[in-house]
Every structure is written in C-alpha cells, then in structure tokens.
Image (tube, rainbow, N blue to C red):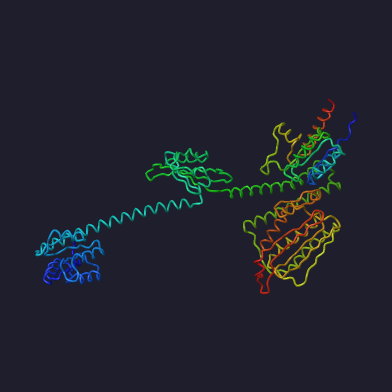
Amino acid sequence: MARETPVIMLVDDDIDFLEMNRHVLESRGYRTVCATDPCEALATMGTEKPSLVITDLMMQALDSGFSFSKQIKQDRRFANVPVIIVTSVSSRRGFDFTPRTPEELDAICADAFFDKPVPFEVLLAKIEELLMGCTQEDDT
Amino acid sequence: MSVDGTRILVVDDERGIREGCRKVLASEGYDVASAEDGVAGLELFEKSRDFAAVLVDLKMPRMGGIELIERIRQEDEDIVLIVITAYATIRTAVEATKRGADGYIPKPFTPDELLVAVNTSLKKRAVSIEARRLREERERRLLELAFERSKSKTIINCMTDGVLVVNRDRQLVLRNAAAGLRIPECVALCLPSPLDALECAPLKELLVAALEAGSRPAIVSKEIAFGKSVHMVNASPVVEPNGETLGAVAVLRDITSLKKLETAKSMFVSMVAHELKSPLGAIEGYLNVILGGFVKEDSEKAREMMQRALARARALRTMVSELMNLTAMETGNFIVKRSPLEVGDIVAEAVESCREKAAAKNIELALHSTDGVEEILADRDAMLSVFTNLIDNAIKYTPEKGHINVDVGSNGLYVNVAVCDDGIGMTDEETEKAFEEFFRARNQYTARVAGTGLGLSLAKRFIEMHQGRITVRSRPGKGSTFTVSLPALGDDGEESERGTNVT
C-alpha cells in the first residue's frame, strides 16, 4: 500500500506555537494545516482529512480543547483520527486536567496529553506511534 | 453613742416643762430647741429638719400633740417621737402610738426617766437607720449585679461574631443572636439543651475538643461552612482560676469575604503564571527549533523565528512592568506626580510615538485637537502611557489601510480624549470585559496580535486615580471608540468644583 504524506491538523490560538510546530513537522515530511480556533479547524477538516490533530486546550474557553476533541470523536468521519491535546493550563490555575490513566485519557477523548512546551522529539515520537496504530487498525 | 450636737425639739405649753427638759438634755450634750404649741413646733421642725427626736405634750392650744405627731411622722419616718403628758391613760398612749409615737413619758417624770426614754429611743432609731441603710445597700448591689448581667448579655447579643457556650455536661447554655443567624436550628432550642441538638458536626467536635483540652490553655480553630458563608470558628475552654473547667466557648467569625478575596488573589496569581508561561513557552520552542536543527541556523527562517522570539520576550517584559505597576497601585506604593498638563500636547506625543507602527500597516492616524482645551492636573507619565496604550491598541486591532481618529476636546468641566478606529471591534460580551485584567478577545484576528491583557486594565486604574472615567463603545467589524474624560483644571488652578462632584 502506497503511503500518502500524512496531514496533521494544528489548532492553537497562539500563532507562534502553530508556526514552530508547523515548521518542525514539515521538516519531518508531514503536511500541516493550521487553525487558530476549533470552529475554523472543524470547517477545514472536512476537506483536508487530517490523519492526526494536535490541539491546544485553552482557547476561547478554559477547556475549548476538550469540547473540540469530543466533537472530533463523535463525528463519524473523524472518529479514528488521533487527537493530541497540549496545554499550558495543566495544574497552574488550580485545575489539574492532566489525565493519569488510559481511562481518563479516554474520557477527555484524547489519545495523548502534553504540557506545553512539548519537547519536539517527544511530540514526533508520539505522532509516529499514533499514526502507526491507526494504520494497523485500518489493516485489521 | 455620742449625743454631741444631736438636736431635740421639746413642744409643750408649760414653760417649766420646756425649761426642765432643756436643762436635763443639754447637760447630756444634746442641742435642744423648744416650742410652746403644735403650730410653733411644726414650724420649727419644718424649718430645720435636723431633729433626731421630738418630745410632744398631748394637750396644747392651736395644735394638739396627736396631730403634731401625725404631721411630723408623715415627713420623717426615722425621727423619734416621744409623748409627754399628764393625761397618762392607756387609751391616749395607744392612740399616740397608732399615730406614730415611739415612746411615752408620764408627767411628772424625773430627769433620769426622761434621759432613759430619750436615749433608748435614739439608740433604736440609730439601729433602724443602719438596718435600712444596709438593706438599701444590698438592694442597690443586687440591682447593679442584675444590671451588669443584663449588660454583659446585651453586649454578647450585639456582637457581630457568633458566640456559643457549652457547660462541662456538654449542654448548650448560651447562644447569641449572631450565632442564631448562622445556625438557625439553635434559635428554637430551650437552654440548656444537649450539644447533640446541633446538626453541625465539625462545630460539635470543636467544642468537645475545647472541653477536653481542660486546664491546658488551648484554642482550637477550624473553618466551617454555614450555608453559603464560611466561618472561622475558634473554641476555647472556660477555665476557673483554680483550674476547674466550667465549659467551652466558641466564637464564629464570618470570613466569607476574606475567602473570596483569597480565591480572587490566587486566581490572579495562577492567571499571571499562565500568562508568563505562554510567551516563555513560545521563546523556548523557537530556540528548540533552531538548536534542535529543525531549521538551518543561518537561514532566513531561523532569523524570522528569532525575531518572533524577541517580540515575545519584549511583550513579556512589558507585561512584567505592567504587573509591577498594578501591584504598586494596589499596595498604594504608586507615586502620582500631579502637575498641570496640556492634554493636547500629551496626546500629540502619544500619536507621534505610534506613527511608525501605523504607517507599517498603512493605517491613517489623525489627531484633531480643539483650541482652548483646559489643562488637567495629572501625572504626565501615567497619561502618556494611557494614551499611547489606547492608540497602540487601535493600531493592533485595525486591519491594514484602516483609519484611526484621535479627538481632544472639552465641555468646560471635563477634558475628553476619544480614540476611534474602524478596526475589528468587539462583541458586547467582550466590551463588558475589556477592562478586566488579562482579558483578551480571542478570535482569528487577535490570535495574530501580541498583547498582555493588562494595558486597558492599567489605563482604567490610571484614569480613575485621576478622578476620571474611561468608557468604550464597540461593534464587531465596525470598530471601537475609547473615550477618556478627566476633570478640567479651573481658572484658579483648582479642579473645577462642579467638575469633581460630577461622577
């Protein structure tokens, strides 16, 4: 099976994070699509059909990322698209969103959860792992 | 008993009796006055009112002895009244005693008989006066005690802190009005009532802990919620000087507003932490991209990234100094140097400092200043930072080729500066929060704009510090107008009186 270049959707209201992640991912041969809010992202996803989504948690609202990931997982078209949530909220505002078990991760509809800034190597390894899992699932 | 100077009145129509009595009594040290009938006797009594005893003959012209005794007794219940009469019959004696006489001396009498009768009666009088004094004293003390008790009770009842007292048998024995407000179930309780009648478990535990602390001086404290309010409850044992524990007292202080303040403060701190972390994360990320070899170090891309990182570092520095200003204002350490200022000049300076930025976005930045605008009394640096911030914001949130108009005018009482743009504007919800710390409208456009979310909140504080007002009108897609009004300086160099009263 010929592998197409995977498309990764980046969602963050901080344009610098979009910029640096876009650059790093493109340098590793991924194609990226950027959006600064979940609405814009959902609109683009229909046409771009990303293989993976990386979203910030706190955008318009403290937990915009959660409702966004839930919307993705509930949409039949994207149900199998892995979602990585990155955040600088974490425990800093008295809210600790960090999931500690696979069940908690599942509950927030995410496949991975990172504190910002994520070391690029860690992020790249996770992307690799999640994309691999997807292809295997598709094969079975 | 010393008789020196004790005054005695003798009332008798027989001169011999009067003189005889006077001599006998004076020889004992008494001070004696006399009158020849009831009317004269009563007159003397009423004039001086310091007689300890009156000797009264029964049969006298004008006013008889019985009537005189009656009249004097009405006026003075302590005075000794002794009847002297030749008509010594049981009937008259009983009659005289009924009317208030203390004793009876039949005529003729010997000097000794007179002295015994007078001395004995006076002793009795002294004893009864002393007894009455003691009785009155006791009654007064009891009254004072009762008053003290009711005073303490009133004070405890008027306290804004709730007070609950339990005895050592764990019975609630006292609760004040404030405690009743917080713990409604205790209002209906008849005191004493078992402590278990209270529903609030932590409060009961606290009182029991204080009781068990016994003579060791101890205060046990706990934050307890009653309904929507939070209370700091301090309980301590009530210990007598001999070390015996009588009970425990709990004082309930409402700390709801303090808790709210605490929450707001920690929310603010975590917000600051978050706002610091984002730009630091961006700077760190860019450096990692370059150092991690994701981009060639000498490439145009690397340069672009370093420029972005630099911009974020600068914004971070601005935010830190704005935070310091904010803190200085809150702690009252911000020094305002007020001097008369031409608002037009300050605004012109602010406009000039922003020209380059406006030009870079092809934005037309125009200043319209009316002549003869009054001066204001204000801190120059603060005013410059406010106007620069407003114009800078307008440039940030106005797309390329937009227009910004800055107007300076006055209505005599207030000097008004309006910064009006045809930029992206704000929704009503965003407008409402525009002056809140760290509020930033979040949308596709603002995502590309660097800002701290502190500028407007600082501007508002600066303006309010100068008794002014800052307002905003905005419509999404149409633009925003921020208007600052500051009290104008009057002709005499004072802020115009009417001006400062208008709020």
Left or right of B254? Residue B165 is left
Left or right of B321? Residue B163 is left
Residue B233 makes an appearance in the image = yes
Residue sticking out furthest to the bottom? B492
Residue at x-position 86% and y-position 38%? A46
Up/down of B236 relative to B92, above or below: above
Give the percent coordinates (x, y) of residue B167. Answer: 42, 41
Left or right of B203? Residue A86 is right
Quarter of the N terminus of chain B within the rendering = bottom left
Say how many tags the image has: 0
Residue at x-position 75% and y-position 46%? A60
Residue B314 makes an appearance in the image = no
Left or right of B187? Residue A138 is right
Viewer-nearest residue: B233 or B26: B26
Residue sticking out furthest to the top? A140
Give the percent coordinates (x, y) of residue A73. Answer: 79, 35
Give the percent coordinates (x, y) of residue B182. Answer: 53, 46
Q: Quadrant of residue A47?
A: top right
